[in-house]
Amino acid sequence: MATQTNITNDEGENSDLFIGTLNTAITDSDAITYHPYLNYDRELSYYNKSLIVLGKTTRGGAGTIAQITDSPVSNLNTTRVLRFDYLVRSNDEDGCYFETGDSGSPVFVDQNGVAAIVGTNSLLSSVTTPAGTNYLNYSNFIPHYVDKLNVVMESTGYRMTKAIPGSTTLVLSHTPPSTTIRAGHDFTIGLNLGNTGSSMAENVKLENSLSTSYSVSSASGSSWFDESTNTLIAARRASIDTSENTDYSLTLSIPIAGSHTHTVTYRSDQSSEVSESFTIDVMESFLSWSLGLSDPSVTGDDDHDGVSNLLEYVFGGDPAVASRLVAGENISLLPQFQLVGGSYTLSYVRRIDYADRAITYQLTSSSTLAIDSFSDASAMISNTSISAINAEYEQVTLTLAPSGSERFFRIEVTLDE
């Protein structure tokens, strides 16, 4: 056992109850599950309830709650216990009494077909009468210590599960980023889970799955504990109180452009499982566009046509085909400078959705061609005309005003994904 935390009694002393943490996590393949505890409103409701009592070597028996009291043994700190009795001569073949080695084993009540914990075996005393020996069995009365158990468990995102959970309502808000989502780049989805019902939601689960491949940078929220797997982004939270809201933030990237489905599933002990699906539209980016190239960098040139990947991307080329034409068109891939009717024009191909792709095209000029001598020349544009090429590209033609001196022009392209 990795840790052991003693649960204190009402006087602040260690009771005969503790909670432990295992060295190794329990997995699904272990086929081990939990039992809820029986949560009646008052102690009197537990009296005369039939018990299922387990002991060492998986032996079991039956009993009936006769009393709930403080432990009667003087050399032990006070512990709230339940008592059930066994008379040796009672001929009750299902009845039982404790023996050495039974300590810590559970005591259950059948609550509508569910084995609900009410105690853990603690101590035995006996009373001899003319009719025979009465064995008085005492078990730590778990419902009395639930609040203190919860304090310990909440530090790791759990609470004791109730056999009679009640009901409440959880409501999800899903907030995608307000900016364009680009393939291969991180974006953040905000989730807010609120409890609009009249009861606390306990042992809350939140699961995220996507219809495509993805990479998670972070998934977190205040008081949320991660329990993700290879296929699921999952978290747990001990509770969400009534009228409380809690945020959970998911930062991830999707490498493939298109419409993808984000499914969020949430539940608690007090609310049934709900799944909601949302569409995430991901735009093609330079990262996804160049993904299959042997050199996917902005300076790469797989087809060896002298045009870099970045220029192929912004001007409409095909990086796998050696060509100086726009893919599928008889239009020059690179900007063209011409004298038309006495006016100089500079034409270039531009992506129609260039703003969403974080691409900027800027006219610059220099009188010397020296490095770093080019500067913004937008003031020299006297007219701009745009004509569609296809659904993705358009041709921009800039008419330039006379400068009075010799100038060199170029279109500078910036990608700021």
Image: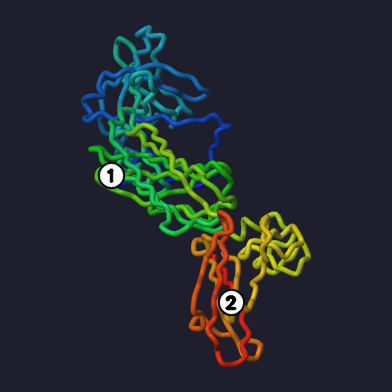
Left or right placement of residue 108 versus residue 390 in this view: left
| Sequence-first tag of 1 and 2 | 1
Identify residue type, mark 1.
Answer: Asp
Q: Residues within 10 Å of mark 2 (few under 14, many from 20)?
A: many
Which residue occupies the extreme bottom position in the image?
Answer: 405
Residue 7 in which image quadrant: top left
Q: Residue at x 75, y 69 (%)?
A: 306
Which residue occupies the extreme top position in the image?
Answer: 91
- Residue denoted by label 2: 345
Q: Nearer the viewer, residue 410 or 372?
A: 410
- Residue denoted by label 1: 241
Total numbered labels placed on residues in the image: 2
Which residue occupies the extreme right position in the image?
Answer: 304
Q: Nearer the viewer, residue 258 or 89?
A: 258
Tell me the quadrant of the picture where the C terminus can be found: bottom right
Give coordinates of residue 120: x percent, y percent. 39, 30
Q: Nearer the viewer, residue 219 or 86?
A: 219
Q: Residue at x 52, y 52 (%)?
A: 282
Location of residue 383 with respect to 312 vertically, above or below: below
Location of residue 349 with respect to 412 vertically, above or below: above
Q: Residues within 10 Å of mark 1 (few under 14, many from 20)?
A: some
Give coordinates of residue 142: x percent, y percent. 33, 33
Give coordinates of residue 12: x percent, y percent. 29, 48
Mark 1 or mark 2, whichever is nearer to me = 2
Regarding residue 41, the answer to whether it shows in the image is: yes
Instruction: Kindly report the distance in space between the C-alpha atoms of the residues bearing marks 1 and 2.
Output: 68 Å
Helix or strand or loop: what does disc 1 sit on?
loop
Location of residue 11 with respect to 269 vertically, above or below: below
